[in-house]
Amino acid sequence: MAPQQRALAAPRIDVRIGQPFRAAVRAAWLRGVARRVLSAEDVAGPAHVGIAVTDDETVRELNQRFLGLDEPTDVLSFGLNAAGEVPFALPLEEATSLGEVVIAYPTAQRRAQVAGRPIEAEVAHLLVHGLLHLLGYDHQRAEDEGAMRRREEEIMAGLAISGGSFERVHGGL
């Protein structure tokens, strides 16, 4: 009989939702969106990602402290590994930490309202965008921005969340 192959663990997704937003956002829903993105990008466990939903001021402070930009924004991504980097001699059971996505919920609410779309669609889009950054996508150059936007749209369509077209992410309202 052939030795049994050990199944790889599903990606671990930790979610933290700030107190004022816990009634509006469900952690299980965020995990589901994140799993769909990771699956669409062929990220099979073991991997780990963190998601935080917080207020505008916290995101502004993080933006200033880590990126040197004293301005509000809608989503931040903090990668822990360089894109495509595989940690040396990582045991099969140990998860590779991809990083964390931080979403400013009040900004997402304002953007959704201005665009006339459900808040769920806006939050999902910000999460998709943030996770794609952790997976190596970027939008600094025009050709990279086009590729990232196409991938965002493909994944959003696969999530079947209505919301129309999405503007470029990163910015406050």
Image: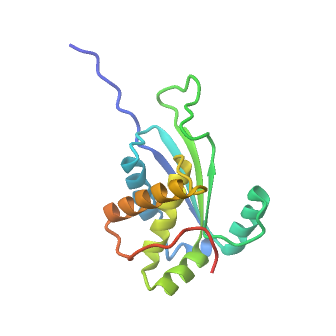
Q: Residue 105's quadrant in the figure? A: bottom right
- x 42%, y 49%: residue: 38
**Quadrant where the image shows the N terminus:** top left
Q: Nearer the viewer, residue 35 or 167?
A: 167
Left or right for 140, reference 129: right
Asked if residue 128 shows in the view, the reply is: yes
Q: Nearer the viewer, residue 48 or 146?
A: 146
Image spot of residue 153 (x, y percent): 39, 63
* Colouring mode (rainbow / by chain / secondary structure / one colour): rainbow
Asked if residue 131 shows in the view, the reply is: no
Image spot of residue 23 (x, y percent): 51, 76
Give the mark count.
0
Image spot of residue 143 (x, y percent): 51, 55
- x 41%, y 59%: residue: 150
Q: Residue 155's quadrant in the figure? A: bottom left
* Residue found at the far front of this picture: 142
Q: Nearer the viewer, residue 1 or 117?
A: 117
- x 38%, y 54%: residue: 36
* Residue found at the far left of this picture: 1
**Quadrant where the image shows the C terminus:** bottom right
Above or below — where is 73 with respect to 10? below
- x 59%, y 25%: residue: 88
Q: Nearer the viewer, residue 137 or 96?
A: 137
Left or right for 172, reference 159: right
Left or right for 32, reference 134: left
Above or below — where is 108 with respect to 48? below
Above or below — where is 92 with respect to 29? above
